[in-house]
Image (cartoon, rainbow, N blue to C red):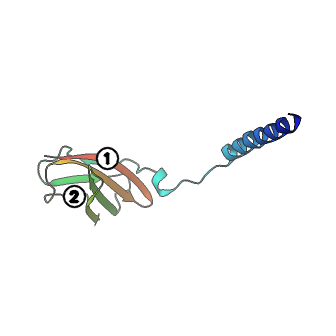
């Protein structure tokens, strides 16, 4: 019994020590952890076939649009604020915007 108690105590000590050490280590931010400052997407819902995307930096943006099943339906790069989505059928989409290493996702409704 004393032998089992020793192993259980040792494993418990290792578990708690490892957990505390893991919490103290700071992980660097990845591209997915950051968001685009001042991001604005309008109009939403969209009925004109064009959506406008602005941000504080207003630099080139990579745009990826997914349907509700997660299938990529559009991927492009825009250097101005206007995005043509006239080829999308009416429905709900997820739009992922990547600008200078920062990324944000929003719901996009096409009427």
Give me the residue at 81% from left, 37% from top.
9
Give me the residue at 77% from left, 42% from top.
11
Q: Nearer the viewer, residue 93 or 103?
A: 93
Q: Position of residue 57 (x, y in %)?
A: 38, 56
Secondary structure at badge 2 equals strand
Give me the residue at 16% from left, 55% from top.
50
Residue at which label 1 appears = 106
- The mark lying in front, picked from 2 and 1, is 1
Q: Nearer the viewer, residue 27 or 40?
A: 27
Q: Is residue 109 left or right of residue 54?
A: left
Residue at which label 2 appears = 82
Secondary structure at badge 1 equals strand
Give me the residue at 35% from left, 61% from top.
59
Q: Position of residue 103 (x, y in %)?
A: 41, 54
Q: Nearer the viewer, residue 25 or 14?
A: 14
Position of the N terminus, as image quadrant, is top right
Badge 2 crowding class, 10 Å Cα cut-off, few under 14, some 14 to 19, many 20 or more, is few
Please tell me which of labels 2 and 1 falls first in the chain: 2
Q: Where is residue 83, by image quadrant?
A: bottom left
Q: CA distance from mark 2 to mark 1?
A: 16 Å
Q: Position of residue 104 (x, y in %)?
A: 38, 51
Badge 1 crowding class, 10 Å Cα cut-off, few under 14, some 14 to 19, many 20 or more, is some
């Amino acid at each position: 019994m004393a032998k089992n108690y020793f192993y259980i105590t040792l494993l418990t000590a290792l578990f708690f020590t490892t957990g505390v050490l893991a919490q103290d280590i700071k992980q660097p931010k990845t591209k997915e952890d950051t968001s685009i400052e001042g991001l604005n997407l309008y109009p939403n819902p969209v009925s004109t076939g064009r959506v406008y995307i602005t941000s504080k930096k207003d630099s080139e943006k990579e745009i990826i649009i997914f349907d509700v099943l997660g299938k990529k339906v559009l991927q492009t790069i825009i250097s101005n604020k206007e995005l043509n989505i006239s080829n999308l059928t009416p429905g709900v989409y997820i739009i992922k915007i990547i600008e200078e290493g920062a990324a944000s996702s929003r719901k996009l409704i096409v009427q």
